[in-house]
Amino acid sequence: MTRQIFGLIIILTSNIAFCQDSLTRKNNLKLSIISLADNAKFQYERVISKNSTVGVTASIYYLKPVIGIKIEPTFRYYLKNNAPTGWYLEPKFLIGYFNTEEDFNTVHNTYNTNDRLINYEVVYFKKKLSFVPIGASLKVGHQKYFGNNNRFVLDYNFGLQYFPYNYPKKQETTEYNDINGDQNVIITSPGAIEPYIGNEGFWYLFGAGSIFYANISIGYNF
């Protein structure tokens, strides 16, 4: 009988120790497994209460035509007060720095002293530029532990985001008179020869600014 009681005490003590260890392991480090086609996405999450966590996501985009980095400070609200597992809502603030190469055109008009158009020329060219998009997102997701001692994390979510492709689109105009006294007006604007999906379409359909968003990540709890 004494041996049985002693064995029961050992089992209860082990379970309590495991529960305490689970409660003290408040950090998750994760890597997205479906975004690797165009970016490496790293996520850190820390429990701050029974129903919420905070963290940050860093995404490095390496696939042209638009490359750069996106930083997402994160807050999660877990619906059943068992953070960091179960269903959650996740609002995010987004900021990034990106480089791309966009289509521009230059229209060169030449007028004589009677304001008559005597020459018209259009030149299309590529221009390298950088921009800083700022946005927000709202996602719904689910997270759970698995593996030995529940040390591994599976996280998936989906939702909407606003992250604009806001490269500089200012039109520039230059005017001067040449040696013949003719007036030259040069207008430089963003735009290609024909409308097409372009970098902006890629950005909103497949890139960092995808309007519809889904992600699956795996990670480690510590």
Image (cartoon, helix red, strand yellow):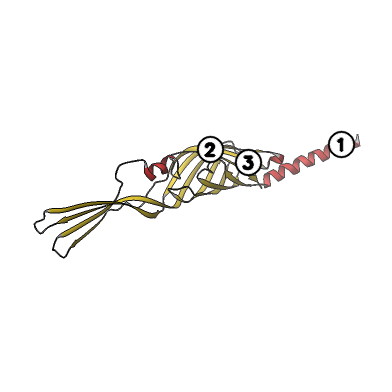
User: Decide: marks 1, 2 in contact (CB < 8 A)?
Assistant: no
User: Decide: marks 3, 2 in contact (CB < 8 A)?
Assistant: no
Question: Is 145 on the left-hand or right-hand side of 163?
Answer: right
Give the secondary structure at mark 1. Answer: helix
User: Residue drawn at (45%, 43%), measured in percent from left and top?
Assistant: 207
User: Residue drawn at (39%, 47%), measured in percent from left and top?
Assistant: 165
The residue indicated by pointer 2 is: 157
Residue 5's disc is 1
Amino acid type, residue under disc 3 in the picture:
Val
Identity of the residue furthest to the bottom in this view: 179
Q: Where in the figure is residue 191, as x and y percent of width and height?
A: 30, 47
User: Residue drawn at (51%, 46%), measured in percent from left and top?
Assistant: 39
The image quarter containing residue 7 is: top right
Compute the Cα span from label 3 to label 1: 36 Å
Dot 1: few (<14), some (14–19), or many (≥20) neighbours within 10 Å? few
Dot 2: few (<14), some (14–19), or many (≥20) neighbours within 10 Å? some
Amino acid type, residue under disc 1 in the picture:
Ile
Quadrant (top left/top right/bottom left/bottom right) for the N terminus: top right
User: Decide: marks 3, 1 in contact (CB < 8 A)?
Assistant: no
- The answer to which of 79 and 171 lies nearer the viewer is 171
Compute the Cα span from label 1 to label 2: 46 Å
Q: Earlier in the sequence, mark 3 or mark 1?
A: 1
Question: Is 80 on the left-hand or right-hand side of 179?
Answer: right
The residue indicated by pointer 3 is: 153
- Tell which tag, 3 or 1, sits nearer the viewer: 3
- The answer to which of 132 and 108 lies nearer the viewer is 108
Amino acid type, residue under disc 2 in the picture:
Asn
Q: Where in the figure is residue 181, as x and y percent of width and height?
A: 13, 63
